[in-house]
Amino acid sequence: MASTSFDAVVATPREGKFNKNAARRVRVSGKIPAVVYGAGQDAVAVTVDPKVITKILHSDSGHNTIFDLNVEGSPATKAMIVDWQNEPLKGRLLHIDLKRIAMDKTMRVSVPVQLIGVPTGVKNQGGILDHILREVEIECFPNDIPSHIDVDVSGLEMHGAIHISDLPHSGSIKFLGEETATVAHVTVIKEEAATADALVAAPAEPEVAKKGKTDAAAAAPAADTKKK
């Protein structure tokens, strides 16, 4: 389930103008700008410690982690990260969105699907495992959010598939995708690859035929030159 063992995230309300220059000054001070919203309350512009947020994002439960949020001057609340922006080159956090969470209400989240084992269709039949749905959307109470969903694929034979209906279901979570949607399947190597291999293996053309093509090709550049 989503971890709540992190120290509380402390957020300081921002005042004044909210433009690029103001955001740059926040980052120079060692913090990052953020917005807190949700739970029927007004949105609040704040600053937070990027190291704390990075630690949460890199945890097992990632952005689905529920943690205590202390906004100075406001009562403590539960929250989670719903969006974030990284610097393109260095990958440093630039901005995040935090959402207040009502622990007694269900919510929709996307959780990763982890495939366990090596399919028999790969080991014994020469197939490849194609992981199509790497995340699935679920609905549940905040305390029931899993960090990931494990599914054993070791029994899959060639052309065998795992659908959402095959994922471990429980009374605490509800899958929102189509039950027939394919999560993963064992398939043959793509036809394009087989065609490329066939071309590589094809015998070379006779030298006489090559010469005729070379003569025709040699005339083409001259024609192009005249057009220019």
Image: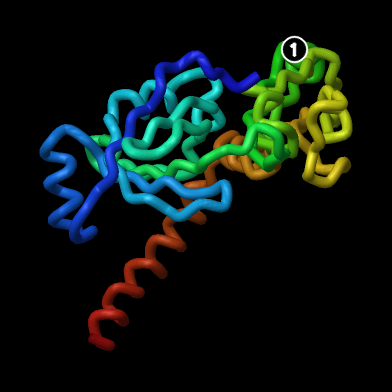
Residue at horizontal 53 percent and vertical 26 percent from the top: 65
Residue 136 percent location from the top left of the image? 70, 37
Q: Quadrant of residue 130?
A: top right
Can residue 125 be seen by looking at this rendering? no
Residue at horizontal 47 percent and vertical 19 percent from the top: 59
Quarter of the image where the C terminus is located: bottom left
Tell me: residue 22, above or below residue 126. Answer: below
**Along the horizontal axis of the image, is 85 left or right of 169?**
left
Looking at numbered disc 1 in the image, what kind of residue is underneath it? Lys
> Label 1: few (<14), some or many (≥20) within 10 Å?
few
The outermost residue toward the bottom is 227
Residue at horizontal 28 percent and vertical 88 percent from the top: 227
Tell me: residue 95, above or below residue 152. Answer: below
Q: Quadrant of residue 166?
A: top right
In front: 176, or 31? 31
Name the residue beneath numbered marker 1: 123
Residue at horizontal 41 percent and vertical 69 percent from the top: 216
Can residue 149 be seen by looking at this rendering? yes
**Along the horizontal axis of the image, is 153 left or right of 114?**
right
